[in-house]
Image: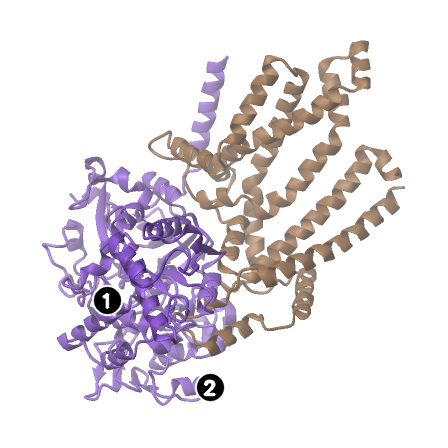
Chain colours: A purple, B brown
Amino acid sequence: MLKTIQIAILLVLLMLGGCGQPPATDSGTPVKIYRHAMDGAPGSLDPAQAASIYANFVVVNLYDTLYRYKYLARPYQLQPNLAVSMPEVSQDGLTVTIRIKKGVYFSDDPAFKDGVGRQVNARDFVYSIKRHFDPDTRAQGAWIWQNRIEGLDLWKTEGSDYDIEVTGLRALDDHTVQITLTQPFPQLVHTLTQGYAAIVPREAVEKYGQMFSSHPVGSGPFKLASRDSTRAVMTKNPDFRQEPFDLADEGYDPAEHTNPGLKTLQGKSPPFVDQLEIEFITEGAARWNAFSAGEIHFIKVPVSQFDTLLGQHNPLMLKPQYDDMYYFEASPEAGFIYTNFNMADERIGYHPDSEQNSRNHALRCAMVKAFDWKKNNEIFFYNIGQVFPGIIPPSVPEYDSNADATYIRHDLNGARKLLQANGWDKDTLPALEYGFPNSVTERQAFEQFRNFMMGAGYPADKIRPMIFATYGDYQRAYSQGKVALINSSWTMDYPDVENLMQLYYGPNAAPGSNSANYNNPDFNRLYEVSATLNESPERTLIYRQMNQLLMDDCASITGISRTLLFLWDKKVIMKPDRSFLGGYFMRFVDIADPANAVP
Amino acid sequence: MKGPYIRRSFLHGIALMLGVTFISFLLMVYFGPDKTYELLGKNPTAEQIIEVRHALGYDRPFLLRYGDYLKQLLTLDLGLSDSSGEPVSSILSRTLPISIALVLPGFVLGNLLGLALGMLAAWNRGKWLDKLVMSASVVGMSISFLVIIISLQILLCTPYGFNLFPVRGWQVNGLGSYLYYVTVPTIALVLVTLGYNTRFYRAIMADEIERDHIRTLQAYGARPTELLFKHVLKNSLIPVLTRIMFSVPFVVISGSLLLESYFGIPGIGLVTFNAITSGDQPVLKAVVGLTGVLFVLALMINDMLYSVVDPRVAKS
C-alpha cells in the first residue's frame, strides 16, 4: 500500500514537473538570454535616484552616460560612451568641453511627438544634471557636483527654473556641452560615468512625473520590458548605436583575460544578448539553489557557500567538480568596512579640556589595538578579506604597502597598558553605544566587537548595542550624534582616493558623509590642496599623509575590504564587475553558441 | 432578528476600523521607518534634510496626514510609492492576486488535511493512531519554515535532488505553469501549517466528541461517519470558522514573505517587507490599512456566519 502511494506521489510530481517548462520564443529563433542575480533590488529606476549599486546596475543599461570605464582594463580607465572623445579641459582646469555623438536616439515612447524617440542632444545632458538640484526630483546625486559647477547651486536657490540658464552648465550647440567649474575638479569625468549622470529626456520626466522612476525612457543598450520586486527584464534596444567591439581598446590582455570566449567578441556590436534578466535574490541559500539548478548564469557567491566551493585559499581555487562547470573570479571590493568613533562626542572624541582630550585619544587608540582584524576576517570574510591600515585600500593605486601596520596589529597588552597609563579602568571607562541596523550578521559583528573590547578590560555592559529597524533610521541616529561607535562601510563612487578622504573632511561633518565628525585642520588643509590636483606622485604623497594623520588621531577602527567571489556558467562569455564598471559590463555579455562551445 | 444583528456588526466594524487605522497610523508616523535618509545623497546638508522631509510630507500636522490617509483608503487612491514612484494601487492590484494564488492551495489543503487528521486523532483519542498523529504534528511544528523551504528546494528543484520544479519565478500563463510554480511552495506551506492545524482541530473535535448528545447518538448506534460529519463537525463549526476567517487577512495581505522571498514570487508579502525595510510609507500605510479593513470585514463576516451556523448567536 505504502509503495503504491509513493509511486503515485512520484508520478504526480513528475507530471507536474514536466507540465510547466518555460515557453519557447514566438518566432522560434534562438534568443540569447543572460540571467544575472543580484543580492538586492533597486528602488527607483530614475537616474537621479540611482544611489544603490542595484539601481545603478539597471540604470546604466537603460540610459546613456557620457563616459564609462573600459570593459577589461584594470586599474579602471575612462572611455567615452555617449561622448565623442575625452573632454577638452582648459589650461586652468576650469572649463570642460564635451562633444556628444550625433545620431543617438531615445527609445520610442508616448512622451515624444508621435511616440517616436528623438535625437539625444546636449540640452538633455544639461537638463539631467540640473534635475539633481531641483528639490522636486528627490535626487540623491547632487552632493557630487555641489559647489563644483558655476551657478548651479545658485540656480537651485533661485527656484530651480529649468528655463533659466546656468552659467557653468551650458549646451553650446546641439552636440556640445560646456561645464565651468568653481575650482579644478579632476574627478569630474569619473562622476559622469555614474548612473546619476545618465541622460534623460525632459518630455518623459514631465509626462510621467514621479512615475518616471518606474517608467524609464532612455537611449541605453536595453529597454525595460518588465520589473517587479523579484526581477527586471530588459530587451535589447534594436536602435542602439552600432559600435564594433575592439578588444585592444577595451584593455584586453591575453595573459590576464584567459576566458577564450572574449576573443570572439571582436568586431561585433554590443549588446550581444537579446534579453537581460536580473533576478533580485537577497537570500544566499535561494541564490545558490537557483544557480545550482541552472536558472541563473551568474552569482556573487554567498559566504556560506565558500567552504562548498573552494578547494584552496592561496591562491583561491575552486574544487575540481566546480572548476569544470563554472568560471570563477575573486574581486576585491573598492571600499572598506570601519568603525568610526564619534569625535563630536566628548566621552570618546574631542574634549575642550586638553587633559581629557588626551585621555580620550588614548582610549580610542587602545580600542584600535584591542580590535582583532585576523579574527574578524576569519569569522566574517572567510579569511579572504584584505586588511589594511587606514582608509586607502589595496584596490587603489594610491595604496601604500609600507603604511604603518601597527595600526591593525592586535595588541591586547598594549591596549591595557595604554588604558592604565591614562587612568582608565572599569569604573571610569565610558558606556558607549555601538549602532547597527537590525540583522543577524550585524548583531554578530557587535558581539565580536564587544568581545574584543572586553579583552582589553572594557566591561561588557559598557559597550551597548543600539539597534535600528532600517539603515535610514541608523543613519539618522548617528547623524544626530546619538551613536558613539558607528559601524559602517563605504563603497567608492569612483576610482579616486578623494572619494575616501572626503569621508573625514571637517566641513563634511554630520549630517554629511563625515560620520566620525573628524576635524583635523591639517587633514582639512591637505584635502583642500589634493582635491584640485590631478593624479600625480605629489597627490599620492598627500593622500598617504592624510591617511597617517587619521591613524595618529585614532579616529576610526579600520579597515578591511571584502573579497567578492563571482561564479558564472561556462557558456557565458564575460568578465563580470561589481565595482566602478558595474552594470556597464552587461552590454558585453555573450552566450556561447552551444554548437560552437567555448573549450 | 438577523437584520439588526448585521447592522450592529456593521457599525461596530466602522468604529473598529477608525480605531485600527488611527492607532496603526500613529505607530507608523512616530515609530515607523523614516525614509528621509534613504532618499538623501551620501553627503547631505541640513537644508537637504529639511527639503526631503518636506517632499515626503513629514513636516505636516499629524491630524492632516491622518485625514489624508482616511481619504486615500476611502477613495482607494493610495498615492505613489516613495521608492519606485509607482501608484500604490497598481502595486497592490499586481501583487495581491499573486499572493492569493500562491497561498490559497496551501491554505485550503493545510486546513482540510488538518481537519481530517484532527478528526481521525480525536476519534481515536488515546490510541496509537492519535499518538502518532500528535507526535508527527509536534515534529512538523518544530521544524523551521526556512529549513523546510530550503530542503524542498534542494530535494525537488535542484540537480542534487529530483530537479522537477523551478527554484524561483512566477511566469504563470495557464494551469500547467501555475502548477509548475505553485507546487513546491504549497508543499512547504502545508508541511509548516499542518501540525498547528491538526492539533487545533483535534482539540475542538475531542471536546465535542465528549459531549452527551454524541454519546447518546453512539448509544443509538449511529455510524462513525454520520457522527463525525453530521454532528461533531457541525457543532464545532464556530471555532473552525473563527480560525479560518481570521487567517484570511494574513493569506490575502501578508501572503508568505518567506515563500515569496525564497521562491522569487512577486507577491504582496515581499512588497510589504521591502516597504518596511526602506521606509516606503505610502505602501506601508496602504498595506496596514488594507489589513485592518480585511480584519474588520473578516470579523463582520464571521459574526454573520455565526448566526447562520448557530441561530442562538443572532438571538442573543
> Mark 2 belongs to which subunit?
A
Q: Amino acid at mark 2?
A: Thr
Residue A157, labelled with which disc? Answer: 2
Q: In the image, what residue occupies the spot 52% across and 38% down?
A: B175
Q: Considering only vertical position in the picture, is A300 above or below A14? A: below
User: Whole-percent x and y of residue A463?
Assistant: 42, 55
Q: Earlier in the sequence, mark 1 or mark 2?
A: 1
Label 2 SS: helix
Residue type indicated by callout 1: Tyr
Disc 1, SS: strand
The reply to the same-chain question for discs 1 and 2 is yes
The image shows residue B121 at horizontal and vertical percentages of 63, 19
Q: Which residue is mark 1?
A: A69
In x, y percent, where is residue B259?
49, 42
Location of residue A568 in the rendering, given as x and y in whole percent from the top left corner: 26, 47
**Numbered label attached to residue A410:** none
Q: CA distance from mark 1 to mark 2?
A: 34 Å
Can residue A237 be spotted in the picture? no
